[in-house]
Amino acid sequence: MPTDLSHLDRIPGVAKPDPILVVDNMRKRFGGIVAVDVDHLEIQRGVITALIGPNGAGKTTFFNVLTGFDKPDEGSTVFDGNIIDKVRPDVLAKRGMVRTFQLTKALTKLAVIENMKLGAKHQRGENFLRALISPIWRDQEHSIEERGDALLARFKMDHMRDEYAGSLSGGQRKLLEMSRSLMTDPTLVMLDEPMAGVNPALKQSLLDHVRELKDEGISVVFVEHDMDVVQGISDWVVVMAEGAIIAEGPPESIAENKEVIDAYLGAHHDTPLDLDAGLETDSGEEEE
Amino acid sequence: MDFSFVFAIDWGFIFDQSLKQAVDINAIVYALAAIGLNVHFGYAGLLNFGQVGFVAMGAYGMGLGITYWQTNPALAVLIGIIFAVVFALILGVPTLRLRADYLAIVTIAAAEIVRLMARSTAMRSITRGAEGLNEFIGPFRELNPFTPSAEYGFGPFVWSGNRFFTVVVGWTLIGLFLLLVWQLMRSPWGRVVKAIREDEEAARALGKSAYWYKLQALILGGVIGGFAGMVMALGNATVQPDFFVAPLTFFFWLVLILGGVGRVWSPVVGSIIFWALITFIQNLGRQMVDDGLIPTSIMDTTQVDQIRFWVVGAALALLMVFRPQGIFGSREEMALDAN
Amino acid sequence: MTSSLGLAGLGRRLVGVFVLVALMLGLFAMFAPPAMADNEMVRTRFVYTDPESGERVPAVGVLVTVDDSNGEFVGEGESDADGVVEIPVAGPGVYGMTVDPESLPEGVFLLDVERATALVEVLPDRTGQAIFQLGNEDEVGAAATGRVTARAIVQLTVEGLKFGVFLAMAAIGLSLIFGTTGLINFAHGELIGWGMLWAFMFNFYGFAGIFGFMEGWPAPFGSGVNLALAIPIAVLFGMGFGWAADRFVFRPMRIRGVSLIAAMIVTLGLSILIRYVYLFLFSGVPRFYRDYTAQSAIDLGPIQITPKDLITAGISVAILIFIGLFLQQTRMGKAMRAVSDDRDLAESSGINVQRVISVVWVMGGGLAALGGVFIGLSEQVSWNIGFRILLLIFAAVVLGGLGTAYGALVGALVVGVGIQLSTLWIPTELKNVGALVLLIIALLIRPQGILGSKQRVG
């Protein structure tokens, strides 16, 4: 699978060799404000794509629409060859697109291992009638549990398997949510500000896990504010401002992109963005 | 103060009555309705303020099966179940995609619609208006293995044959449904439902259709409520619309909360405790009025029966503020966080 | 800060409203209250034109049944040799007399087949007349108009609007309480009952109703006062109740962190408690106010309306307009709308949310009380009208848009008119059911209501 996209033109809406997600003519308005105004976007399969932009750029709304948690006023999206307009998130998850949330949604009243088991697909025991008869689902439940334990071990959380998720720290919940989403056997993982509120020690660990996803052939799209992270792991960066995509390209090219600099700083600058200083907005800051 | 009044009261009678009522048909009906409500709210987080409507559906369905469609008892019970399922669909389909409050409003209104329609003159040919259904009990009585004229039981727990039959059937149903709920909640289905209750979006992000599971829970809890209605019908040998007034739903809620939301058996315990207490209070009150300890200028015997409403209303309000987990629930499990 | 000027201004405005209302109610003093008695009856006479002789002859042996306004069976009878049937009823009120068309003589039919039930208002010590048009075979064939006459539509619409404005007053409070606090107040019906019953008490007993020792003192202490004076007192009590409910029940709960769902259940518990205390104190028998209850309808163009209905509806409209202006123009009104829209945003703009909520409860309590009295005057005073009205309020606010005052108003008018017009097609006893069915349908099609915004819903 090609991960070297450096030969592609750095134009918003540029076609990708093997897109897993294609968006066309997507618009969404809130009252009088245009929240999303995307003509064309293709997400390459098997790479890590970052979606960045200043506050109010519409990234979150766009992200929600892509993952089925919001409806566009117009536009179409094709996921893995299938049109997914107006498809609900649970159906998307069944088809292989899973998302995480900026404010982690670890199910606090379930044990960690139960959280994991929840993620598995095609569970016989989740059907009302079959649930009544244990023998029908017991074996499957065991194998799911083994998978869950294996994933937890990979994320170094196996010692916490029987704890209620409510007793986990913030960082541990992040790991739980990520590992849990992998139980759905996804082809595309959509991460909503995965580093929000995460301490630096954990950040590295999370980054490694995201890279592992790519090694397994899973496509990743993530929304982020933290430019270090973007530089660190993304293969491709998409920049949004005022609802539209203003730039696309490998991470190095974005730092020097005039449009991007203008969008972030709101003025004309000749110097490239200094990514190590000052650009980081407060992590966890909300945007519309 | 003169405590001699203590001797004027027949405590033995009051205690006997309280113990008996704790396991008699009323307690069974409330327990079943509360088990259904536990599925709705305790496990699925659904705000069903119209459980009395499900109870009515089960009762009328079963009664009409005999009086209107003239079938046998088994089919009549099935009709009762179908009525409850249809009711759940009518309530759930429009509202389960909306906020929880809307289900609350719709269910309370729908239950009242059921009562008003049942007692209307327009439906008189079917539901017999305010007098209700009275001729369905025969086929059920024929199934009774016990001798109607004999007495069964011991101590204060004595019933005549027909009533004893209903009591036995009722407790059997309770046992069956407790088993059913227990099994479901420990299964993956139960896991999904619990997840949806806590955070619907998280569950949907993992591929679970929140709407579909909530609908199933609504149907299940509603059918169990329907069975409560059937036991009520058997116990009273009549089905009248004014049995199913709105406050009754909140008696069920009190029983549920008293026992402790979210535990399999707590609705049953809640019902037993509730009925023991209420019977105690009411009998005490009645005797005190009869003996003149409470002057009739303050309260007469019919008004004593209204005490239960004050108790329920006040208890509901106080419990929700000071001890929402009831007796056996755990505060952490009591997921009443405003979302 | 906006506080002191806002509060003083608010206080002045409230006093102003009071004076205005009291003055308008003074109009009532023009109508003398007759005494109550027990000789009420519903009566009708069946005649038709005999096709051979062309003379008007009585229809004998026609069966009728009479139900009261709750749909409860009252009595039945058969027309005598003069075509007359009279059925005694328990007291004044609105009754429905239903004809059994099968019992009509051979060849005689109801001209208006769909309306086999006629509504009759029975005044104290009077006989209410029901009118049924009968026709023979020739006439029925020639009947041009359908069951629905323009006149009936206009009359019912007016009655619907009248009830609608009463309902609107009661509903605005609930909608605003939801908008500003997120709480659905299931005890709102009891706020309505509160006003209705206090007005009754002051109408009949004065303060002596509570403080027995005052018996014999001059009114309003020892005995009752004219309803026109009892009403402002009841509204005051309503405002007080609303204020106290927020101050001593709901604000402590908010501070304590009790969730909204728990708070809802608290309101449910309280509503049951309060309603059955009402039953205990008032008894289950519906009663009527002493004054202005019995009035004949006057003709006003195509419609018939009693003076009391005209005046109470007029006052309600004035108050609703005032509320509308209040919400639009005054600081407090705008603050209310801001808090309803987005509480956090309002708070960070410097609005004292706690005070806004308090005002909302006071206003809601007063409006509900007034609505309660007017409804009680228009229909009857009873302990549990609150619950029935609550369900109609739900229908109104869902239809109009939960959380906005204007939504409550629009929804209430739609519900009011809808209920009355529905009686053209469905039996009167089920007219409230129609509103509730409408509620469910509205949720299917447009859950945010006519005026609501979509985000409040999903």
Image (spheres, rainbow, N blue to C red):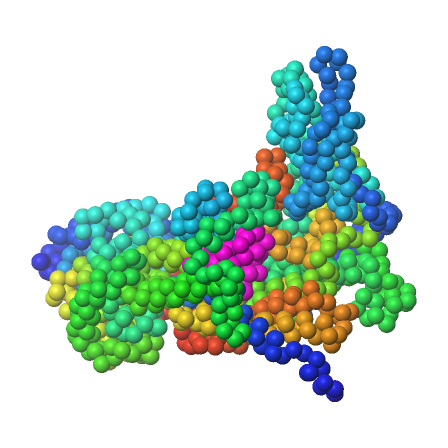
Q: Residue furthest bottom?
A: B1
How many numbered marks have been drawn onto this rendered protein structure? 0
Residue B43 lies left or right of residue C13; in this view the side is: left
Residue C199 lies left or right of residue A285; in this view the side is: right
Q: Quadrant of the C terminus of chain B?
A: bottom left
Q: In which quarter of the image is the N terminus of chain B?
A: bottom right
Residue nearest the observer in this picture, C347 or C266: C266
Residue nearest the observer in this picture, B325 or A217: B325
Q: Position of residue C35 (x, y in %)?
A: 86, 49
**Quick check: C228 above or below B299?**
above
**Quick check: B159 above or below B240?**
below
Residue at the (54%, 45%) spot, across then down: B127
Give residue A7's quadrant in the image: bottom left
**Residue C451 included in the magenta stretch of the image:** no
Residue at the (65%, 45%) spot, across then down: C71
Q: Residue furthest top?
A: C52
Residue nearest the observer in this picture, C452 or C9: C452
Residue at the (70%, 38%) spot, across then down: C76
Q: Where is residue C345 in the image (x, y as percent from the top left)?
A: 50, 65
Residue nearest the observer in this picture, B265 or B40: B265
Magenta stretch mostly in which secondary structure? helix
Give residue C331's quadrant in the image: bottom right
Residue at the (49%, 62%) spot, across then down: B161
**Residue B231 included in the magenta stretch of the image:** yes
Q: Where is residue A143 in the image (x, y as percent from the top left)?
A: 17, 68
The residue segment tinted magenta is B224-251
